[in-house]
Amino acid sequence: MDLKKTFNSRAKAEANSGFGTNPSNYGGRFVNKDGTANVSKRGSGWLDRVSWYHTMINMPRWRFMLVIFAFYAGVNLIFATLYFIIGIEYLDGIETTGSAWNQFWKAYFFSAQTFTTVGYGHISPSGFLTSTLAAGEALVGLLSFAIATGLFYARFSKPKAFLRFSAHAVVAPYNGIKALMVRMAPYKNNNLTDAEAKMTLAMVVTENGKPVTKFFFLDMEMAKINSLNLSWTLVHPITESSPLFGFGAEDFSQAEGELIVSVKAFDDLFSTTVAAGTSYTFSEMVYGAKFNLMYSENQANTRTILHLDKLNSYSKVSID
């Protein structure tokens, strides 16, 4: 079966998708699993394309700490080398009779004390060049720690949705028809209200004998909810107006494209709107499956328990 000719032609495609329509330029997916755009920019200098602030704020925690420690060690290594080149004899308190490596490491720790403005006092600069270098290093240290403190605070206070999405989308029975479903759940102790979701299907179809990427805004059973405290399953009923109407298991396995999911909600702690998103290629859609329930009541029947480890749990069902 030629899938590119079997999509529902009655479904209304959207032109203002924000993505190109030429499938030959399609890089595997438009949106990464973490919701970021799968785009690599070229045509200008690297420094013009990179925002250091956004990079430092959004990088993983372990990498951020590694960059901070590497910068700290590297700057002190540079200054220690300069002190050593000027002459170790201009650092009062360092014995000049030891090995060169021993002298260098003492100069390194003097640099660390100057950079952090600790200044224990047993080593001090003498001479114009060494004193000038130490004064300059103290200024660099003050500015560096001010920037690092600002980055720490920005990362700590940055509003986030703290939403996790299921690893797969499923096609399950739904009120006598089929439906495409995606599940999400908040995994922190934040409180999200007025949540709103959108599902966009990008699919390669044949139009006038040429492959074209079409975009469809999918209708949803419920696109808005007042409070997002438990899991939320987004449901797109596959009715006659759906671009997926008439698709079977073979069609889903042969289709090319992806489902793009975006969610925004209001975080009452920060009093601002937060957003999250993800995407699912057709290979990440499980045909003939339904999500298992991921919340229950406690033994005293006084509290609802949300089992985050069951977010990706589903069972196979027959729908044909």
Image (cartoon, rainbow, N blue to C red):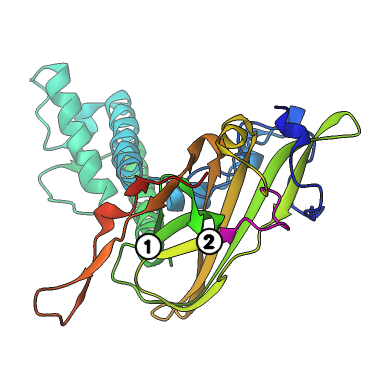
**Of 114 and 188, the residue lying toward us:** 188
**Residue drawn where x is 37% and y is 65% of the image:** 231
Residue 185: mark: 1
Q: Nearer the viewer, residue 179 or 121?
A: 179
User: Marks 1 and 2, Cα distance to the nearest angstrom?
Assistant: 15 Å
Residue type at mark 2? Answer: Val
* SS for callout 2: strand
| Label 1 crowd (10 A; few <14 / some 14-19 / many >=20) | many
SS category of the residue bearing label 1: strand
Which residue is label 2 attached to? Answer: 235
- x, y (%) of residue 267? 44, 76
- Residues in magenta, as a range: 235-244
Tell me the residue at 67%/45% (across/down). 246
Quadrant housing residue 258? top right
User: For this view, does 267 lie left or right of residue 10?
Assistant: left
Most foreground residue, 105 or 1: 1
Is 258 in front, or is 75? 258
Q: Is residue 119 left or right of residue 16?
A: left
Q: Does the magenta-highlighted stretch encompass residue 297?
A: no
The spot of residue 27 in percent (x, y) is 65, 31
Magenta span: chief secondary structure: loop
Q: Position of residue 297 (x, y in %)?
A: 19, 73
